[in-house]
Amino acid sequence: AGYGQRKSKRSSSEPHSTTSFKNQTIVSIHRPIHHLSIRMSCRQLGNIDYSSQKLFGRRSEVELLKTLYKNEEKGPVAAFVRGPSGSGKSLLINHSLRNVKNNEEVFLLSGKFDQFHSGEAFSVLVEAVSGLSQDDTTTAEANSAILQIIPSLQNASTMQSSSPGKSQDEPAVMRGWGFEMLKMLLRDYLKKLCLLRKTILFLDNLQWCDDKSYIDLISSLLNDPEMENLIFVGGIRSEGGSRRRADFNTSCTSFDSCLAAVDQLEDMACSTTLNINQLDIETCNLLVSDLLHLEPESTKELTQVLHKKTDGNAFFLIQFIQMLERSDLLCYSLPHIAWTFDVKKIESETSLADNVVDAVVGKIKELPAKAQDILKVAACLGGRFDPLMVRELVNNLPNGGFDICKDSMREMLELCTRQGLVSAVSVKLEESNSNQEFFTFAHDKIQQASYLTIESTERPSFHLMLGRMLKGMTDDSSSQLTLLVATRQMNRGRFLIEDPNEKLLLANLNLVAAKTLMKDSAFFPASDFVDISLELYGEQGWTDHYDFYLETLTTGAKLDYSCGKAERCQLRVKEIIVRAKTLNDTIPAYFTLVDMHSLKRNYEQALSVGYDFLKQLGVDVTKRGGLVNVAYAFLSILPEFKKRTDNELLSIPMTDDENVVLAIKMLQSLLSSAYWLRRDYEYGYMVITMMKLTIKNGTTSMGGAVFSIFAGLCAAMGKFELAKRLGGLGQELDGSIGDKAYRCKSMMHYLVFVGTTKSTYYKSLDLLLEAHRIGMEVGDLDHSSLCSYGYVVAYYLAGLPLESMAKDATMFSLRMVEYGQWQTLMCLKLYHQCALNLMGKASGSPARLEGGAIENIDEHLQSEHTATGFTRTKQVYATVSLQLTYYFRDSQMSLKAAELNESFKESDWPAFHALANPFFRALVWIEAARTHRKRHYARKARICIQKMEKGMKQGMVNLFHMLLIAKAEYWTLTCKSSQVQDCKAAFDEAGSVCARSGFTQGAALTYELSGRFMLRCDDEDWGLHYLKQSAELYHEWGADGKANQLDLEFDLFSKVAHKRRGKMGSGIRGRARFQEADQAGIHKGRNDLAWSIASSDAGSSEDGSGG
């Protein structure tokens, strides 16, 4: 290699080492290369260290990633490292994370997708979470929530799961779009980590992800503005060609869809893409010289040949050098103490393989037969394997199996490690507090090559043989993971099974595997196991194996619902209903079908199926929804509450009648369909029926929800005291005997229909968020979304900053899109767009509901509401449009909006979002009466005011400030010159009450109306004074668009520049500012500007009466 010709830089006076014969030889024969002895003193002479993790030529990329890890900007960031296979993507990322791994102020979660077993039960997530330190007490709170959802994470570090004999509750996420709900839980888990520390999530080999839900989860993380400390890093292969996996010609459709989704992630504003190219010739020379421990000058000619042969691919380059070593084209010369080679011979006697896999296959076939068998079996089991399991399987291989002892196994694995094929990883065992050694393939190409050493015609039989051996190794104490692996292996060879009994056994194993994965919330792979199980039962499943086939088909229908496969879910449910022998056999199918229809907004079909099931239970609620029937049923049950005390109601015994439990459960499932179809009378009759069944037969685990829902009906019927009483009892029952699955529903009905009418809005904010969280945990997506919608509306009506409301609305909108909650989403977007218009962010006329939050609302509602139940959404549209058109003084549009709003026949007091309807209608009618001089408008306004007075007598505290404003404005219609000061005082009192109660928007509107009134009375000084105060209050609320409209109309701030006072809230995290103060009954979060204005101007209302 030319070392003998170099001159020594060492002085002749330096002593030579004589500690060993080898070192003596090195110094005496080749004195000029004495430094080489130091580099090789810890290595065996003549062995190349192919497991080296050194990185060459990627300094700029490493620095870029390190800069990303130090990101101080708010919001999540992402980096995608793209490059060809073997270009060193994973090594680059791992090298950049070296310092992070030892940083106690950073959480590092890393996982890798497996080309053979990407469908494992959240194997990538398990791998990522298991990397967190289990001794770190700061992660205990964050881990506790996710461990309740994915039980296998508890044993992730040992790759074990609970034994099949242990009973586990079916996860609550089975209700609703299970996988979508699970994404929210995973996101919340990561959010908890991000609140504690900066969190880096590294997922490698994204090209092998065949489950788009992973990509959707990443997308939702990167779109969440609250994930401020999250850094996502993804490694992905960039070369084109087939994405088909190496096992059994798996279809590449799911892979391609995932890759397309990844491309969309890379286009996000927070994403950075690093394209890793092949190594240039200079960098390749550094790599070669380091491997051979030679100077770069001496390897230039060799590198030129290698670069030409491998095109600069680092992985292929190393494999090519190994091939040269095996072919004796690269030899270690002991006389020269260096590697020697003939460049011309290498160039003439070697050819470039078609791909790197072929080269690795040739390399593996040159290994001892024992090592080949080990790699074959390991490749079938996955990217990470247990050497003990592999040894047992290899020892039982027929026709050539080996009796490999523990030492021999260690020797073979060390050989594979030296060849750079596998690497050892140590995993801590929780039970014994010791470490267990596992092995992983050094690269997915190596795993693929190991698998390809099995002849294609023999692969099915090889998988079947492994599956049978694994099944024989399992017993009651075996892990569920072993049983899953055995089932998967047998499935790949199931076409070779001829014994009917073995087919039946495998079908049952697939059902067990599906249920195991369901408990881990892995719905998509569980669905695949069910499909195989049904295939094995065959056409005679109903006749020959009724019980097993029914259970499998029912499980499949549940999984189809959780995975969003609506059509197949309906087909399976209908088959069960038609062919089942008893009603009890059809119960799960009926509930699954109702949920699926509701999810797809087929509310008519959901009610039809539910009514049919209730008839079979002896409960008939069809054609009972008329006004007379509902009123009669409601009045007939009221005496039951008069003659019973609270303790007696709480002491109602639990029923043991299963039909009653099923009837109440079905009725609760149907409520949302009746609500969105606006079948108010049917809705009411179903609620009354639930209450009657509870009082007559006994309560259930849903008793708290029944009481709370009935309390909401009482509020709608004007029985507010009874509503408050029963709502409170419902919350008590939830805390004692209530099922958590119905807790969200109970809280939603109590807070929305009762709580917000009997107490101020801000008191409900934290409770609504808590109900939303509970609903997402148990999979009650409908009511959880309604709670988040209720939170945004209550935030808006409470007069809290619009900027914060808009941020929260954006976040909740993203979640609703993921969950498919389209009706609630549309209602939320209406309020969101209203806030944007008030903030001055309208795309067109601020009085129209159109712009960034929602487009073409009129056309959408017109085309959708009849077919899919958007009638309720249209009612919300009428409510929001009425407010917006009045705020921006569009008299013509506001008159139409008031007429549309009036056309909806509301109950006395509907949901809290509509409490302001009579108030704004009164204001519109008053303005119309003043403009058009028509008495019937004034009469309509008076009716609305009387309605608000009635509500105040019933204790609806949120109406008080609106009533005062409406009365003062109504007085302006008939106010005489002698009454101007009295009318002004009425406005002052209304403004003072608004300020004391924290209703910033109410105070702003009051002073606007007062200013306009004073201008009409030719008092310009007071008029402009009130209008300036109004504009400042609108600015304080965040309604810059409305404030600017006032400025343009009256030229309020032409001489004095406006400065915004106060600070905007920070969304949900800032809501603690708005808690109630204990002293003086004044809100802690009241608007200081509104209070100061009211205190200085409202002389007649300093006593705060009615505040």
Image: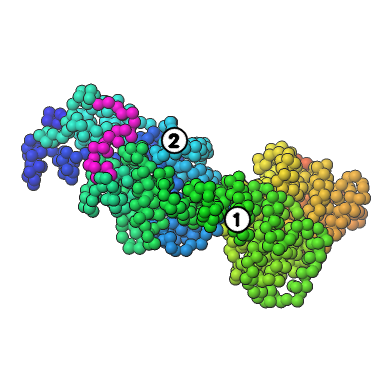
* Front position in the image: 55 or 1072: 55
In the displayed structure image, the side of residue 336 where residue 687 appears, left or right: right
Residue at the image position 72 percent from the left and 44 percent from the top: 867
The residue that label 2 is drawn on is 243
Q: Quadrant of the N terminus?
A: top left
Quadrant of residue 478 within the rendered picture: bottom left
Indicate yes or no whether the magenta region holds residue 368: yes
Q: Amino acid at mark 2?
A: Arg
Q: Is residue 520 above or below residue 846?
A: below
Quadrant of residue 23 within the rendered picture: top left
Q: Quadrant of the C terminus?
A: bottom right
Circle 1: element type? loop
Q: Provide residue 818's location: percent of width, then percent of height.
A: 58, 47
Magenta segment's dominant SS is helix
Q: Provide residue 830's location: percent of width, then percent of height.
A: 70, 46
Whole-angstrom CA distance, mark 1 to mark 2, is 42 Å
Residue at the image position 88 percent from the left and 45 percent from the top: 931
The residue that label 1 is drawn on is 580
Q: Provide residue 525's location: percent of width, then percent of height.
A: 48, 48
Q: Amino acid at mark 1?
A: Ala
**Residue 610 visible:** yes
Please provide the residue range marked out in magenta.
350-373
Assess disc 1: are there few (<14), some (14-19) or many (≥20) residues with their C-alpha within 10 Å of its C-alpha: some
Disc 1 versus disc 2: nearer the observer: 1
